Image: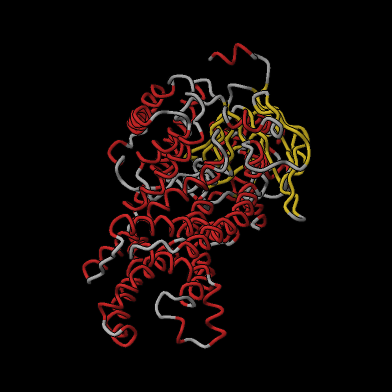
Amino acid sequence: MVWQYCRPMNPAIETSGLAKRFGATRAVDGIDLAIPAGSVYGLLGPNGAGKTTTIRMLTTLIRPDGGSARVLGHDLVSEAAAVRARVGVTGQFASVDEDLTGRENLVLFARLLGFGWRRAGERADELLAAFELAEAARRQVRTYSGGMRRRLDIAASLIVTSELLFLDEPTTGLDPRSRNQVWDIVRTIAAGGTTVLLTTQYLEEADRLAGRMAVIDHGKVIAEGTSRELKASVGGRALHLTLTDAAQRDTAEVILKAVLGEAHHLGEPNQIGAKVTREELVPQALAQLAAGGIGIAEFALAQPSLDDVFLALTGKPAENLEAEAKP
Amino acid sequence: MSNGIHGVLSADRRPARTGTFAAVLTLAWRAMLKIKHVPFQLFDVLVFPIMMTFMFTYLFGGALAGSPRVYLQWLIPGIVVQTMVFLTVYTGVSLNTDIQKGLFDRFKSLPIWQPAPVVGALVGDLSRYALAACVVIVVGLILGFRPAGGVPGVIAAIALILLFVSSVSWMWIIVGMLVKTPESVMTSSMLLLFPLTFVSNIFVDPQTMPGFMQTVVSLNPVTHLTNASRGLMQGDVPGRDVLWVVVASALVTAVFAPVAMRLYYRER
């Protein structure tokens, strides 16, 4: 797309010490980000970590009270109107009108983005067709399923081609099928050249979609990098085994400890895991298990998940953080 | 699906920025669509005044004015005033709903004249109020209301009432921005709307009231609005009352509209 050629090296978003407090709470406590243009970037963190507040600042809905930021080269505070003219927003806080039909919503937003009535209607129909909402076009949005609503939400932010699209928790509350659809949509949007900044509390989602990501906790960036880099920071892989006979687990544990130095029980009674610091020892461990007559139904040499990353960074699993971060 | 989406992404460049007037008009259109989609909002509020019309006309009309028919001529303009004043709450209620649902955040993130969502909602709501007024007038005509001022008189009265209620709406816009739920907009507004419409001359002639009450009633802008509407619908031009209403509306708007806009720009 044209703008990439015009400003090849400029990041889409650049923040420095961005901060926002609500009363005594430091919702965002000095965030530095450099988000390259043309990528999908993930802001990852539990509820209440400061993700939405950060996006609300970056979309000019609230003013930062510390630090500075440039969005697509425009200063967030002094050039707020220029920022608004070039970004798209969707997500849990920027919504559609539930009383109106899907089509009326798109016509409404198309009109507000500068289309004439006729062209707004055409654009609405194009988007409804593309997002497989044509059949529901004349139904009130309150009758839509969660997945349909989210697709309409995203369609509304694609009425004009934005250089930068903010997606705030695009798949929260969706069933797996709808979530996969939204992921496809995000990939398609990114392939079209739009920079996407997405927030999520699902580690898997950031892993699947985002090239780079920042892990946010208590208003601060606690880690930044590609999914691979973040996982590498945890160190090592994990061997996951499913045994044919649960009664053999203790024997298997002894063998694994002897070869790999560590082993631990997993969720199911016939599952066992071990940390792998030297991968060349894995075949030896498997051979020893076979020699010991232990039947293996499945085995996997897994990358550490982003859950492991969170645990390593904060000392707490992500789930626990979610529970305690509730206001 | 992703193929289809890829197709619509390669759309034209952004059109020119929406003009202020177009933005307000579009947002007013949205407010008017609610008549189609959420008609109960209108019916809800119409049931009460129509019930009052029947009750007062046929229960008390004879006692208050000699005959129900004579009383009806006096009551209907007041009922129109009451209906429209009560309806103003819905401006605050729907605004509050929009804020809670996150719709206003989306509006605010668009490159439009920033007050457009509030002003547009108000403009759209005024047309809803006018529709409600027409319903009440039609019910009145069926019951035997015969305005001597004819169509022009009735239109002039409705226009004056619209001016007044647009100023009152700003108060509910403020309430709508301050409270947490649409229900609390409703509850808090009733505290003002009941005294405002009942401590007036809508239902009975204040001359039978005790002295202090007469003073309160004569200071209530709704009393002047009702006088003016009665006059206009019956073919007079009650200059003093019309002036009173225009000045009161201007004052209320001048005080509350800036507060409302300040609250609108405030962060949530």
Does residue A59 sit above or below B207 in this rendering? above
* Colouring chosen for the image of the structure: secondary structure
Q: Residue at x 29, y 56 (%)?
A: B151
Residue B202 in view in this figure: yes
Q: Is residue B191 left or right of residue B203?
A: right
Q: Residue at x 65, y 42 (%)?
A: A308
Q: Is residue A33 left or right of residue B42?
A: right
Q: Position of residue B186 (x, y in %)?
A: 49, 67
Residue A280 in view in this figure: no
Q: Residue at x 61, y 49 (%)?
A: B261
**Closer to us: B233 or B193:** B233
Q: Is residue A143 left or right of residue A192?
A: left
**Closer to us: A149 or B185:** B185
Q: Farthest residue to the top: give it.
A: A5
Q: Quadrant of the C terminus of chain A?
A: bottom right
Does residue B66 sit above or below A116 in this rendering? below
**How many numbered marks, from 0 up?**
0
Quarter-wise, where is residue A206 in the image?
Answer: top right
Does residue A98 sit above or below A180 in this rendering? below
Q: Is residue A90 left or right of residue A52?
A: left
**Closer to us: A171 or A67:** A67
Q: Position of residue A60 (x, y in %)?
A: 64, 38
Q: Position of residue A312 (x, y in %)?
A: 71, 42
Does residue A252 sit above or below B187 in this rendering? above
**Closer to us: B37 or A239:** B37
Q: Position of residue A234 (x, y in %)?
A: 70, 36
